[in-house]
Amino acid sequence: MSHYHRRTKIVATVGPASSSPEMIANLLDEGVNVFRLNFSHGSAESHRKQTEIIRSVAKNKNRNAAILGDLQGPKIRIGDLVKDTVELINDSEIILTIDDNKPNSETCISVGYKALPKFVTKGDVLLLDDGLMRLEVMQVDESDVTCKVISGGTLKPRKGLNRLGGGLSAPTITAKDEEDLKLAIELELDYLAVSFPSCAADLKPVRDALNQANIKTGIVSKIERAEAVASEDTLRALIEASDGVMVARGDLGVEIGDPQLIGVQKKIIRFARLANKPVITATQMMESMISSPVPTRAEVFDVANAVLDGTDAVMLSAETATGNFPAQVVRAMAATCLGAEQHPDVKITKRAVEETFYGIDTCIAMSAIYAANHLYNIGAIICLTESGSTALLMSRLESHLPIYALSRHRVTCRKMALYRGVKSIFYDVTEHGHDVYRSALETVAAAGQLVSGQRVVITCGDISGSGGQTNLVKILQWRGSEEEL
């Protein structure tokens, strides 16, 4: 890895190819910052064990890695097939039925989504298996939807079903999700991704459960429904109600069409950054590396493009969960992020120079980044933080310098693992009294690349040990074992 501080974070999905302590350690060494547990697969016991392994390995390596649980959500799927696979032939007719008494055949396929006949009409285009196959609705009655195959292929059981343009809706939180939510609370996961929310109100059951349990798990909204991006107001409200968002390009691309997806990705990232929320870009980022030891040039460009858009993190799914080269794909992704970050456009920000702020903490964060970008010989930014909110505000602005966020709370340290440009370090401010600045500089020097003679921007509160009190910016000079103003 380069000595340059990589700002963009990497989320890796854990699965059979990456579940051992040895592979978790390997992935951490290659650059993983957040581990994703996909609740669509695996048992509660396997997720418990995996959480224990990740936290144990990270602790041994003195690393702050976050864990993101991902609820399955109301993915609308076909049922089991009469055979292992069924060939859908172009221009042939097939029936999608919600009638459990009707026998399955190659031309009659059961659907678990009982509301299907109510939500589709003649002329609609239905998409199977993330859009690989397309059907046109010819006729609808009480239990059957008769379709013509527009674009055929090999259909496997339990594949997803979408309608072009969206509109197939089911309750966002399913019975399975409720059980998985209890597990996430029990394990005190750092983040929980909610699948298929259409609007801010869909997050309420999860938010209520987390508040009732009094835990600080952050909600990440997976933006993957056409309804979620249909209007800017809906999208902004959904982002505002979340603690972070994910551009879930699989289902979103199926519902709005891939040609629309690139512009929508940029809009979601822009809105999330303006709302001071971290954002993850996901799906097929280095898909070819499931079976190939090197990525395609198009995949490298895709990851780099997301970095240039300002995403906090890029995500790997099957590449690390079931792929043949989990460590190599993380290495390739880290190298790509580093390459993109060298581009001058992402190093210096012009945002907020003309703005007026209501919050002191926002003003302090902006002042620190401005100083870091405009004062000669600044080597690092240090943020003493309780909740991590100042570090998050700083991370919304670009600078070529690392933001070292020091907190006495392990939960805060882990959550900050997702924030772009932030390197979190466990540091108990209450133990250092009057020597707090000296010891903070020494802590960062031990973890980073501070050079004697460099200046350092430090932000903190004047009431040590209490959150929401950041009101101070200091500029100090590092001189090895001692510093002076």
Image (cartoon, helix red, strand yellow):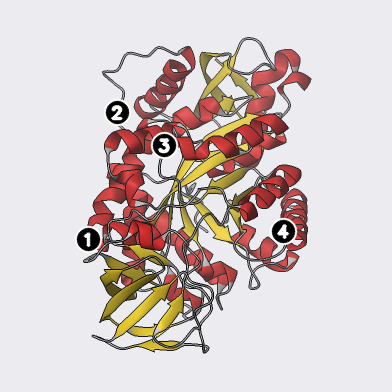
Q: Which residue is mark 2?
A: 351
Residue 345 position in % (x across, y down): 27, 43
Q: Is residue 359 visible?
A: yes
Secondary structure type for disc 4: helix
Looking at this view, is 159 or 23 the one in front? 159
Q: Quadrant of residue 344?
A: top left
Secondary structure type for disc 2: loop
Would you say the residues marked 4 and 1 are in contact, meaning their CB atoms lie under 8 Å apart? Answer: no
How crowded pointer 2 is (Cα within 10 Å; few <14, some 14-19, many 20+) is rated as: few
Label 2 vs label 1: CA separation? Answer: 29 Å
Label 2 vs label 3: CA separation? Answer: 23 Å
Q: Which residue is mark 3?
A: 238
Residue 326 position in % (x across, y down): 57, 70
Q: Quadrant of residue 394?
A: top left
Residue 239 position in % (x across, y down): 41, 36
Secondary structure type for disc 1: helix
What residue lies at 32% left-to-right and 39% top-to-bottom?
Answer: 270
For badge 1, the amino acid type reads Pro
For badge 3, the amino acid type reads Leu
Label 3 vs label 1: CA separation? Answer: 23 Å
For badge 2, the amino acid type reads Arg
> Which of pointers 4 and 1 lies earlier in the amino acid sequence?
4
Q: Which residue is mark 4?
A: 47
